[in-house]
Image (cartoon, coloured by chain):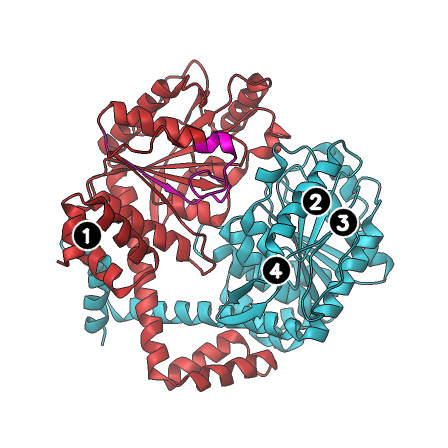
Chain colours: A cyan, B red
Amino acid sequence: MSQLAQSVLSGDRLSLARLLTRVENDTSEGREALDSLFAHTGKAHLIGVTGAPGTGKSSLVNQIALSFRKLDKRVAIVAIDPSSPFTGGAVLGDRVRMRDLSGDQGVFIRSMASRGSLGGLAQATSGVVQVFDAAGFDVILIETVGAGQSEVDIARLAHTTLVVEAPGLGDDIQAIKAGILEIADILVINKADHAGVESAERALKSMLDLAHPVQKVFQHHGQTLQTSRAASDPQPANPNPALWIPSIWRTVATTGSGVPELIEAIQEHAAHLRQSGEWFMRERARLSAEFDLFTYQALMERLRASLPESKFEQILDSIQKRKISPREAVNVLLNMGR
Amino acid sequence: MSQLAQSVLSGDRLSLARLLTRVENDTSEGREALDSLFAHTGKAHLIGVTGAPGTGKSSLVNQIALSFRKLDKRVAIVAIDPSSPFTGGAVLGDRVRMRDLSGDQGVFIRSMASRGSLGGLAQATSGVVQVFDAAGFDVILIETVGAGQSEVDIARLAHTTLVVEAPGLGDDIQAIKAGILEIADILVINKADHAGVESAERALKSMLDLAHPVQKVFQHHGQTLQTSRAASDPQPANPNPALWIPSIWRTVATTGSGVPELIEAIQEHAAHLRQSGEWFMRERARLSAEFDLFTYQALMERLRASLPESKFEQILDSIQKRKISPREAVNVLLNMGR
């Protein structure tokens, strides 16, 4: 194991920051350290927090971190949202609130630069999360924005996914996207002291109820997970204790109101995952996806190394001139590389 | 060429619908048809339209389609936004508005189901767009929501990307995400008859001005594209005619106000792309990405076929037990497959 990886295991913060940069940049030193640290991973509770800008998601992440600190958990925050104060998109008030966390040795905040390449951001985030996991952080909060594919990919990293809404963000129904409800384990209506909280909750509930009657079976990296999507207040009797029914929680992140109850729900979800075996299955799906990605990268590297770059340009020329389709060109290429 | 592909070329709408389904489901018949139709592609103007729910983006897409019809262009709409009326997430008013397009033989609307797999939606969308292109549609509107990676991936398909905003959608500055500004060729403030349009435009302008002084050089699939990101009203003199400066347009999709001017801007952008050579470069980047994806799929297929499924499960067991890291496991696997 490298000196850097060892220093990270021994709790040195400067080494941690350095290794995170190497991992984010996907350097060979970073890769080696990830390989050697891998045996130390698998202990942290990964919590994804996603939602539209303006929901106060970052302040909520802040409060969740503070609450876990009170339970003596070490907390890492990985911020991927460009509008987050953690990544630099904050207004002054947010920055002031961030001070609650600074100076606390049990907290480490890392902001990620958004990446253009396919799978790039999810891969870098996965590496950063693994470093935190190996370094002994008990809770890793992953903050993302929106409902795009990258958020879904990143949510797949998490054991527990929180979807944050807020009252008065335009049309309540339209603001809740189908994709995001599918990944939600826990729904939070933040800014619950604002007008419109009732109608926001009603909209969420009816969307969840719509999804309720049919218990969804969805494919998760080839593994069939059974889950049901519904919530109401009071919570209904759960017909199948192996199924998790997403619940709705109200919070006011500026005062911390509702956050202790939310923390309890998060911990309940972790317990549910462990009891039902879903913790294991989600982890396996995640590791399988990572394995696939690395396989792809290794195969592409071999292929590129086996043929001169000019050959690829020639093929691309033929495609662009519509002499050959991309799929036909792949067949030609792979038969050459044999 | 298959009978189905030939019927699509001859303009049969039922065959078109059938082929789109085959392509979306990635069947072997769909793949073969795509290969044989590929020589007929490369003529359509692909226009991406993205923005948050509640911006009236779908109504705007509707109006843009109507305007292009008046110019005697054949128009296809590919809707990927789950809140869009085209994909079924509409309120009644939207559905009524959609009737403007129904019955017109020069318009074809296709909604896409969101896909979970990596690259799945972008790949399916690319296939659907190619079918429309081959079938002789002059303009293909691709409607997406949000600013996630999948939107950026889909925007890469388009020659021209419109980003739609609306006044009063929460915090104007927060609503505009860095990622989405990077992909915008044209910015639209829809619902321009609503209060707050001035401040929304000011917010957009100042964000664009911030990005202006430094001309960004960004990597697009390995090719360096130079571009500048700025707009103001009146439009400033463009210091470099090869650079496109995104402009801001106001529209009211419910009345059609501002749409003819927007159409002109879209056509100007197409002309700019052709004159500057960027049309060619964007297309090459897109075809290159598609080629990479197919290469990956073919390589993975070969690898999977070369080893029993149980071997993969064994490897995954070792990874999950932390005996070996995913990257180390890939090395072991590829040396076995040799």
Element marked by disc 2: helix
How far, Cα to Cα, is label 4 from label 2?
21 Å
The answer for which chain carries disc 2 is: A
Residue contact between numbered discs 4 and 1, judged by CB atoms under 8 Å: no
How far, Cα to Cα, is label 4 from label 3?
33 Å
Give the number of the mark in front: 1 or 2: 1
Residue contact between numbered discs 3 and 2, judged by CB atoms under 8 Å: no
Give the number of the mark in front: 4 or 2: 2
Residue contact between numbered discs 3 and 1, judged by CB atoms under 8 Å: no
How far, Cα to Cα, is label 4 from label 1?
44 Å
Q: Which residue is mark 4?
A: A20
Give the number of the mark in front: 4 or 1: 1
What's drawn in magenta, residue-wise?
B73-95
Picture coordinates of residue B217, whole percent (x, y): 40, 39
Work out whether residue B198 or residue A172 is closer to the camera in this orientation and state it: A172
Amino acid type indicated by mark 2: Ser
Q: Quadrant of the C terminus of chain B?
A: bottom left
The answer to whether dots 3 and 1 both sit on one chain is no
The answer for which chain carries disc 1 is: B
Amino acid type indicated by mark 1: Phe
The answer for which chain carries disc 4 is: A
Question: From the viewer's perspective, is A286 left or right of B97?
Answer: right
The answer for which chain carries disc 3 is: A
Q: Which residue is mark 3?
A: A249
The answer to whether dots 4 and 3 both sit on one chain is yes
Q: Which residue is mark 2?
A: A58
In the picture shown, does residue A4 fall above or below A255? below
